[in-house]
Amino acid sequence: MSESQPDNAGTPAPSRSDVEHKAVDLHDSGSDGAPGQPENLPVSDTEQQDEVSPDSLRMDPRVGEELYGTQFSATYSDVNVRGVNALGNHNTIHVINYKDQPSAKPVIRDLVGVPELVKVYAEASADRELGERLGERSTACLTGRPNTGRFSTACVALARRHSADRVHEVLLPADVGPEVFHRAAGNLMEGHGYVLRLPGDGHDQVMRLLADVFRRRSASLLLIKDEDSRTGDRHSAEAQHRGPDPLAVFRAHLHHHLCHQRRMTAEASHQHVDRYLDNSDLVQALQSTYGPREVVPIARALGDHHPAHHDVITEILRLSQPRRRAYAAKILRSDTGGGAHRQRRADQHERAFRIAYAVFARQPLHYVFEAAGLLLEEIDGQAKRFDWGRLALQHPVSELLGPLDRDWQEGREINRLHGGSSRSAWLHDGAMRGVIVDEAWHEFDSTRPALLKWLDALVADKEEPVRRAAAEIAGLLAHHDFERVCADLIDTWASSAKARTRQAAAWAMVAADMGGQVAYPVRKHIREWASGHRNYQRDTAARVYASGLQQPDLSWSLADLRRIAEDQMQQHTYMVAEGVYQLYAPHRAHRIISELTQWSDSRQLQRHAGEALLNLAVRPADDSPGSPPDLMTRLAMGEVDSLDLARLWRVSLLTSDSSKRAWDVFGQWLSHADGEETLRKSVTALLNDLAALPALRLRLQFHLERLAAFEDGLPTWLESAMKEW
């Protein structure tokens, strides 16, 4: 075990007073060439050294539901799959192996839901042409707009060509191109189909470059490309995608649901579907949808509530995206009443107040008043209008809210019954939050510069709820114009010397990722921040992970965090450790502990490894009172290597910054082991591994005798373990 021991393995035993007041550093202080120094004045000591409470920065999943409605179904796990294209979480992932590979490796995942997708698939105009292309070539391209079901079309085309259980998706890190298959052709399986969502241009070159690679494997590669209206002639291997008929999508999904969930015959199911489509309101709503993602939830809701009568259908449609958009337009339509007595600015005041009300949903109403005033100032500034000042005693809340007054009154009653503040912004349908902002962005596009400046002003506020709300809306708007929102807001926030502003940039990125359509540019941005030369941007990248974002594969996230942790500025922060904490899941325990063990060998990374271990060491296995840490249960089950865990505990216990907390947490582990026999054997083995280091053996003896949990004397199993040392 000498190779895995810290540098001070031979340190003489300390006196009792030494042990009580200080711990021995694992390494001497000094730099080993960490990248870059801060390009601006360093942040304050308070901002650098404050510990991060677990999950305190994580974005609430409700935010995704509020911003994106039925389009939101993101799950932060090994596989991020969303919406109608969600073909199953925890799909098997295969790492693409090749020589000289970067730390973030490309992966291939099995799309296990393709057989079910084939059963509910509605024909698209590109099906025949795409089938012909795949029959003629080993590489082809499907061109279309996002949210039109193009991924489903690609999967079905490959399933028809190769079989539904032979379809896979290729996922590439931001710094790895498709040419990787020239060096990793052995990862391709004979007679299988692969789909790759490739951003940007260069699809023609990729098809030519990889044609022979896939042909030799009798395999197919199907690229998905964003449609570009400026493009002239299409490549001969391209097929142009158009979204399927929404009524056909509705028929296919509802028919399948009634047959398989309600056990109906095909004939009876078709009759019920036809009856539903006699409802003109339903047909109008379906024809107003923006792609299959909005159709499928309506079909599923009707299937779940079958037989659905008129009132049920009305309620289902009210919660659909088309009806939400119509209601948002009504909300932002100013009251034209009042005649000549109506003040000229009343329309803008109402719209600004309603936009602010949506942005600050679930927040105290005084935020809405202050934010609305700021928005009006930005609008006046853009119009170069005389400053009207803040309006006072002119319009009551009910008048300013208009159609939202019903939500406001309902919220007051609900909050009163639950003992909360009666003056909080409340939306009966939480998903209206994002739709109202969308409507303001698209229908009043001349105010876009004012909206962006308004969000920038809100992020400068000292109160965290204000900054969070502004960051979330910036993430939503990045879905509509990623480059502009990043250039005007997020990139500037990410480079700020203020930690709270950098945190707003991180929240904005997580909010943008929740919508699913800008996943690649979000991850590319994070990779650029993490590997660039600007310390503040690297810190922002760490905050993105601490806020809950995860890459499609764990290795990608860990590679970014390792790169960030090497920054000298990070030696006084806890963001990397919190980022690792957010990545943890029981099935990932071994991979994360193994990675942290490698970090413990590096002087620049040791502190982060130790802090990450202590965060994970107190994470409970479940929500039951007195639940042992999950990491303890993984150790007892043999899912975590005991020697790796011992190396990490040595770092935590012997490093001066973490020593006090580490001994407290380790004492909690021993208490759990004393109360639960199933944990005792593995903890005893861990103790023996730790005691193998002379410098740590004496400290163990000193601290174990002084644990508050064993003040009446050490238990027999622990005394027996100590005698073997």
Image (cartoon, rainbow, N blue to C red):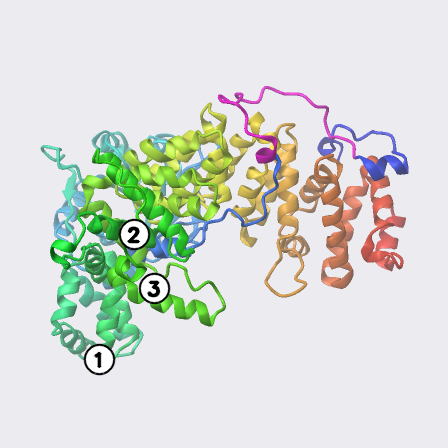
Q: Is residue 10 above or below residue 473?
A: above
| Crowding at mark 2 (Cα within 10 Å: few <14, some 14-19, many 20+) | many
Residue 289, relative to residue 552: is it above or below? below
> Which residue position holds label 3?
408
Alpha carbon separation for disc pair 2 and 1: 37 Å
What are the residue bounds of the magenta stretch?
23-48
Query: What residue is shown with label 1?
Result: 309
User: x, y (%) of residue 716?
Assistant: 87, 59
Q: Split into 4 quadrants, where in the image is the N terminus? A: top right
Q: Quadrant of residue 591?
A: top right
Whole-percent x, y for residue 102 in the image: 46, 30
In the picture, the disc for residue 353 is 2
Pointer 1 local density, CA inside 10 Å: few below 14, some 14–19, many at least 20: few
> Residue, x 47% and y 35% (percent of image)?
540
Name which residue type carries label 2: Phe
User: For this rendering, which residue is in front, 397 or 81?
Assistant: 397
